[in-house]
Amino acid sequence: MTASAPDFIEVEGNRIALRYQPGQAPGVVWLGGYKSDMLGTKAEALAAWAAGEGRAFLRHDYSGHGESGGAFADGTISRWLAESLAVFRAFTTGPQVLVGSSMGAWIALRMNAELNKAGEGDRVAGLVLLAPAPDFTAELIEPELTEAQRRDLAKKGYFEEPSDYSPEPYIYTRALIEDGRNNLVMTGPIHTHCPVHIIQGLADPDVPHSHALKLMSLLPADDATLSLVPNGDHRLSRPQDLELLTRAVGETIARAG
């Protein structure tokens, strides 16, 4: 199926590409990972599932990603969070389930916190977090930096790493790492005030399952579920993974209701 042409919204000087399928609430909002785009396997599977269920579905590309404008190297968690909130507020009505993959789980948790702070907490019906990588700059990258990478960050303002998912290397900037420290969510108990379902592969080479267990331990007051996938990798894009994802979203909608 060929995807429809995207719509665009301008946020802080960048044209942000998005696709919105109208439907009933609670709707579903997809938040992709670092260097991924809204036409990936999981986003497409969710779009098809939401259409079949008559649910509203919203997805977008962060600046520097996919069909959106802006340079990838200019991106930070704060910038991508602001874009996600702007798209969310402009295109959704009523409660929504935020579905975040990898870095998108960090964005989802930050969105939830900002909406709660703004008195809009009832807009989040639940969170489904796949291979969640909140605080990945401080928890997963900074502790592992080599001397050469530290030197590149200091001198060039970035370092590169080969990617298993793209011929282009991953770029991690000093601005991303420094801004990440202003967006940390795993510093104490996390009060989402909504159901949370975490899905984590035990064969994930990028985000260790210990990270998901730590996140789970910080959700003491909420209705939280953890699904561990024995052979699941970071993508969680096999047919059985996609079936688990859509089932988790459906169950989260039911729990929110």
Image: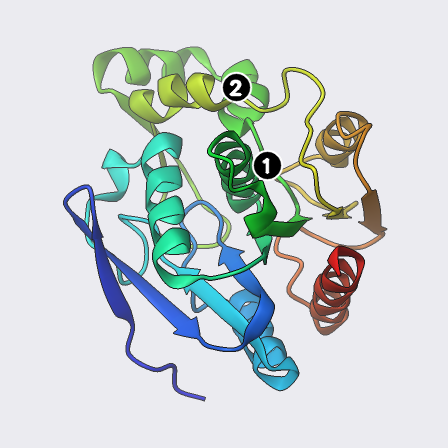
Identify which residue, 155 or 176, lies in the foreground. Answer: 176
Identify whether 223 is placed above or below 101.
Answer: above
Q: Circle 1 — which element? A: loop
Labelled disc at residue 138: 2
Q: Amino acid at mark 1?
A: Ala
Q: Circle 2 — which element? A: helix
Identify whether 138 is placed above or below 7.
Answer: above
Image coordinates of residue 63 in percent, x first then y, are 28, 48
> Who's the residue at 78% across and 64% down the image?
254
Q: Is residue 170 visible?
A: no
Q: Is residue 245 left or right of residue 71?
A: right
Image coordinates of residue 255 in percent, x first then y, are 80, 57
- Disc 1 to disc 2: CB gap under 8 Å: no
> Who's the residue at 32% across and 20% down the image?
174
Labelled disc at residue 133: 1
The tally of labels here is 2
Q: Is residue 37 visible?
A: yes
For residue 47, what is the image quadrant? Answer: bottom right
Q: Amino acid at mark 2?
A: Ala
Identify whether 19 is placed above or below 180.
Answer: below
Q: How is the image coloured?
A: rainbow
Image coordinates of residue 68 in percent, x first then y, are 25, 57
> Who's the residue at 27% across and 70% down the image?
7
Q: Is residue 2 left or right of residue 131?
A: left
